[in-house]
Image: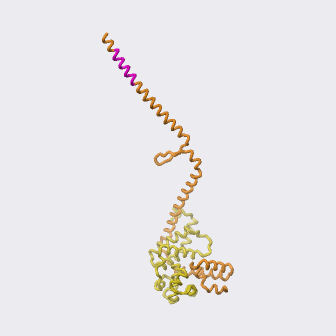
């Protein structure tokens, strides 16, 4: 097919209208590459279609641009937040080895990170606390018993003194 | 809207404004031609421009012109919402605001039908040939003829 026949075939129009098949697109791109005349005609058609659309344009009402800017802004802000969160997640995964050495202690809404070595200290304090509590109870009871014995002895002495 | 409270950079905001100034009117004309509802067209205009800006680099070089890409993007959006499937008749095309074929017998009814189906609805040549019971080549030629007539009218 001669180049003029390709131009007249309507293949350029289907391409520019966005309804060309894969095969037609490949053909158009090949012809565009091989024939400057075809490339020129295609550019002219694209330009003319844009001019036709300009002729059919309707002036948008005021406020549309600010709505678009606002929505684009909101979406980008949301995406940035997601990216930051993802990056933070990524970093935290990378620091997993380091993180393993800590246990997380929750206090209301805040978190505190403590070195894992402290758990032995906490365990020792807990066990010692129990031992001291045991001793405290033991000595308390001992003391009470001793006081009772002293009281009994005092009463006995008093009784003995009276009988004499 | 002030750029100060916008998260988008000043440069990006400038690009959006330039893009909007050049294409918003053309796009609104296209959408209104396709769906014939001014209020819905405005809502779709915002949606289509917003998604095009977010999905496309406005300064990127492409095989097609920005308008062609934008129109195809709009066609896809309308198709996703089943808005481009509404039948377009001769009278609808004639009522399309500022249409080159408006109030004229420039295009034959079949040419108007083919042009509208392809331009506004993005219908394929094979699909149209099947529904109209014509050869694909005939459809392609009639589409070309309708575009050529409108181009000539504009030149004159």
Residue B143 picture location, percent across and down: 56, 85
- Quarter of the figure with the C terminus of chain A: top left
Q: Is residue B33 above or below residue B16?
A: below
- Residue B15 image position (x, y, % from top left): 57, 69
The percent position of residue B135, horizontal first and vertical second, equals: 55, 86
**Colour displayed for chain A in the image of the structure:** orange
Residue B148 visible in the snapshot:
no
Q: Nearer the viewer, residue A146 or B96?
A: A146
Specify whether residue A136 is painted magenta.
no
Q: Is residue A5 visible?
A: yes
Magenta-colored segment: predominant secondary structure: helix
Give the extent of the magenta segment: A144-157
Which residue is found at the position 49% from the left and 48% from the top? A110
In the image, A76 versus B12, the foreground residue is A76
As drawn, the residue found furthest toward the top would be A164
Q: Is residue A147 magenta?
A: yes
* Image quadrant in which the N terminus of chain A is located: bottom right
Q: Residue at x 55, y 57 (%)?
A: A86
Chain B representation colour: yellow
Using the image as rendered, state which of residue A30 and residue A163 is in the foreground.
Answer: A163
User: Residue A161 vs residue A115: left or right?
Assistant: left
Residue A148 in the image, given as x and y percentages of width and height: 37, 22
């Amino acid at each position: 097919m001669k180049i003029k026949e390709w131009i007249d075939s309507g293949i350029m129009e289907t391409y520019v209208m966005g309804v060309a098949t894969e095969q037609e697109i490949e053909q158009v791109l090949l012809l565009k590459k091989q024939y400057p005349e075809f490339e020129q005609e295609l550019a002219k058609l694209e330009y003319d279609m844009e001019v036709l659309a300009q002729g059919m344009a309707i002036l948008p009402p005021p406020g549309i641009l600010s709505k678009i800017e606002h929505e684009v802004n909101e979406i980008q802000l949301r995406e940035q937040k997601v990216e930051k969160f993802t990056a933070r997640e990524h970093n935290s995964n990378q620091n997993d080895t380091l993180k393993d050495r800590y246990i997380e202690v929750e206090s209301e809404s805040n978190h505190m990170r403590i070195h894992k070595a402290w758990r032995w200290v906490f365990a020792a304090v807990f066990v010692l606390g129990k031992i001291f509590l045991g001793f405290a109870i033991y000595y308390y009871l001992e003391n009470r018993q001793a006081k009772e014995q002293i009281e009994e002895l005092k009463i006995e002495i008093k009784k003995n003194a009276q009988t004499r | 809207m002030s750029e100060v409270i916008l998260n988008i950079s000043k440069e990006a905001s400038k690009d959006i404004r330039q893009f909007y100034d050049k294409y918003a009117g053309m796009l609104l004309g296209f959408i209104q031609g396709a769906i014939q509802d001014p209020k819905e067209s405005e809502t779709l205009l915002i949606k289509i421009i917003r998604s095009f800006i977010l999905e496309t680099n406005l300064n990127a070089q492409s095989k097609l012109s920005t308008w062609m890409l934008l129109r195809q993007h709009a066609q896809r959006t309308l198709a996703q919402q089943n808005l481009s499937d509404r039948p377009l008749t001769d009278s609808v095309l004639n009522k399309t605001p500022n249409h080159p074929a408006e109030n004229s017998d420039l295009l034959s009814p079949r040419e108007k039908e083919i042009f509208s189906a392809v331009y506004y609805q993005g219908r394929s040549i094979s699909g149209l040939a099947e529904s109209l019971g014509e050869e694909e080549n005939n459809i392609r030629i009639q589409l070309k003829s309708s575009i050529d007539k409108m181009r000539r009218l504009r030149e004159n």
